[in-house]
Image (cartoon, rainbow, N blue to C red):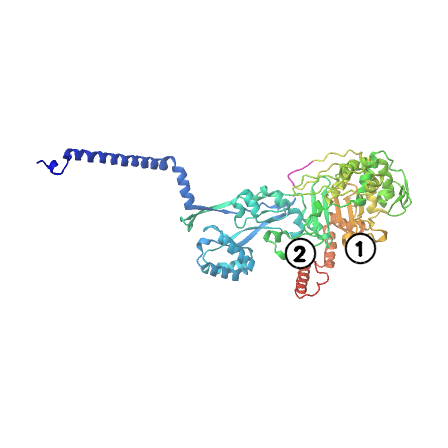
Amino acid sequence: MKADNLLGGSTKLMTEAQQAFSFSRRALLMGGLQAGVGVVLAGRMAWLSVAENERYRTLAESNRVNLTLVPPRRGWIVDRSGAAIASNRTDFRVDLIPDRMKDGEQTLGLLQQLLALTADDMQRIRDDLKGASGFRPVQVAENLDWERFAAVNVRLPELPGVEPARGFARHYPNGAAVAHLIGYVGAASAEQFKKERDPLLVTPGFKLGKDGIEKVLETRLRGQPGAKRVEVTASGRLVKELATRPDTPGQTVKLTIDLGLQDYAARRLGNESGAVVVIDTRTGGILAIASMPAYDPNAFSDGISRAEWGFLTADDHLPLTNKALQGLYPPGSTFKPATALAALRSGIDPERTVNCPGGYQLGNRFFRCLGRHGPVNLHRAIAKSCNTYFYTVGREAGMEAVADAARQLGLGAEYPLPFPSQRYGTVPDPAWKLKKYKQAWTAADTLNASIGQGYLLASPLQLAVQVARIASGRALVPRILADEPIVGPSLDVPPDRMNLIRSGMDEVVNGAGTAGRSRLQLDGIRMGGKTGTAQVRRIEGGARGGLNVPWKYRDHGLFVGFAPVDNPQYAVAVVIEHGMSGSGAAAPVARDVITWLFDREKAMATLTALETEWGGTIAERMAKKQAAWLFQRDAERRAQASGGAPVAGAPQ
């Protein structure tokens, strides 16, 4: 019987040839698959190594080499003769490289001891370390004195990860005297970084302009950062420094300012709250623009403390406000030359006399004068500041003519100056009042405006421009950048008419006028001017400007002037907030400031005596005032904590 029969069915047996063929087919299939994969891998490798070579080389290099920015040195700001208003001083600083640190708390503890770091400093450093990359520096302290910087260097072997560095910091040699002129620098805010996404903004030691010229001219002053290339491992560990590219300093900015005059004007304001502006009547260049009280811009640039900030914001004299540009005041009698100009342009005879019985009757209301001047013409009216005369000619000329003359003299204008903000005040007219208040203009409004009251408002800068245009006869445009000359055209006023106004202003100071006590004590040089007393609020009777009235309700004192009278070179405007009178408070300041331009020794002798009386220099008085404020604040807090009454006179 056959085998297949014995197994109960038929069975096909594979021959040796068939088995060999089947194996070869599977091997060929697997080999083909392997070859295909190999071709794909080889192609991909070729693509990466050839076509994508540059890209991955760059990525590999960026993983191996990191770039650390070096803050650029800011450009200097100098005065018209090249003296530094804002410069850079050597800055000793200490940073931490997180990757190099071993025992972080031990290192921080030793740094706290060596550098006298506060608890706030330590918390800030710890917070910065948490969010820092391994190789990026974290600031510990800046603006260190040599002793503390040297102490860290001596103990450097015990401080792994600590990196002392020498850089540059902003410096303002004249301190508060240039604060509102220049502004200050500071670290970039989180909002600024989110907006610009510039890594330079978060680089330790970098500062940018925060106010004043520092802010407006940031792009010119900043410069280009340098860079330091370092090799690191994949985890960010520093291997070695490769190369350093130096920074490119910012541009030097030259101003029309005379730094000596700027410093003198700020110091001469003493303990008053006010502003001084001096303009060169030949070029329109601003020689001084001082606002006091002020702050020390070095303190802001170094990082102002909470105590300093509290002291500044609590001061009712507003040291953070630039009064020269942002302070607006009724010009008072300093506006009368504009009314005189309007009268002359309207054809009113300057020799015509107006009788002053002590005021002007309008309907059932009597507008008072400063005295009983009797018959006065234009010359005598300016010298004696006779309200009655200007009520009369102002009403006859009309408010449109008065407003037009004021605008031609520079009031109500905003000028192309590199400051973050300036207020341009108000020169009212019938259309303005109707638009703003939905009310018709009245004759009473014209009378008030004619003597510089009512709706009229002007800044000290505008008052300086007004007197500069009167003195020069040209529409000077104030400028502060020395590289941007602006030529002012002649005013649409006959020279003989402007001479009449200048003659009256000469009489104010050098004749029987209101500022005779402030005539220059200089041989052959006279100053012409106009005093002004601006009412802050209506106070009946003789208490309007008296010492029994709270300071903030007293009248402002103003003065505008020019010198020499026979060949004007300089124009000055002074505003003393709540100074009670222009002749008593503002004119003496203008006299001394103008004296400095012709005889510095005499002006400095006057100032030295005054500062002795006041209690020292600006910085010394600020330090004493801050110490007193801190004492009162702390005493008040102790009294409140113990349930007692607040200390009398302490800030509330």
Q: Quadrant of the C terminus?
A: bottom right
Residue stretch in magenta: 481-486
Question: Which residue has dot 2 on it?
Answer: 311
Left-right relation of 591 to 179: right
- Was residue 539 drawn as part of the magenta stretch in this picture? no
Q: Secondary structure at mark 2?
A: helix
Dominant SS type (magenta): loop
Q: Residues within 10 Å of mark 2 (few under 14, many from 20)?
A: some
**Residue 529 seen by the camera:** no
Q: Decide which of 56, 148 is in the foreground and name it.
A: 56
Left-right relation of 221 to 553: left
The percent coordinates of residue 259 (x first, y second) are 67, 48
Residue at the left extreme?
Answer: 1
The percent coordinates of residue 495 (x first, y second) are 80, 35
Left-right relation of 380 to 118: right
Numbered mark located on residue 188 in the image = none
Q: Decide which of 5, 215 is in the foreground and name it.
A: 5
The percent coordinates of residue 398 (x first, y second) are 83, 36
The percent coordinates of residue 181 (x first, y second) are 66, 47
Q: Decide which of 174, 122 is in the foreground and name it.
A: 122
Q: Decide which of 169, 540 is in the foreground and name it.
A: 540
Q: Residue at coordinates 13% horizontally, 38% vertically from top-left?
A: 7
Question: Which residue has dot 1 on it?
Answer: 549
Question: What amino acid is at disc 2?
Answer: Phe
Q: Quadrant of the N terminus?
A: top left
Instruction: Please identify the quarter of the rendering in which residue 330 is found.
Output: top right
Question: What amino acid is at disc 1?
Answer: Val
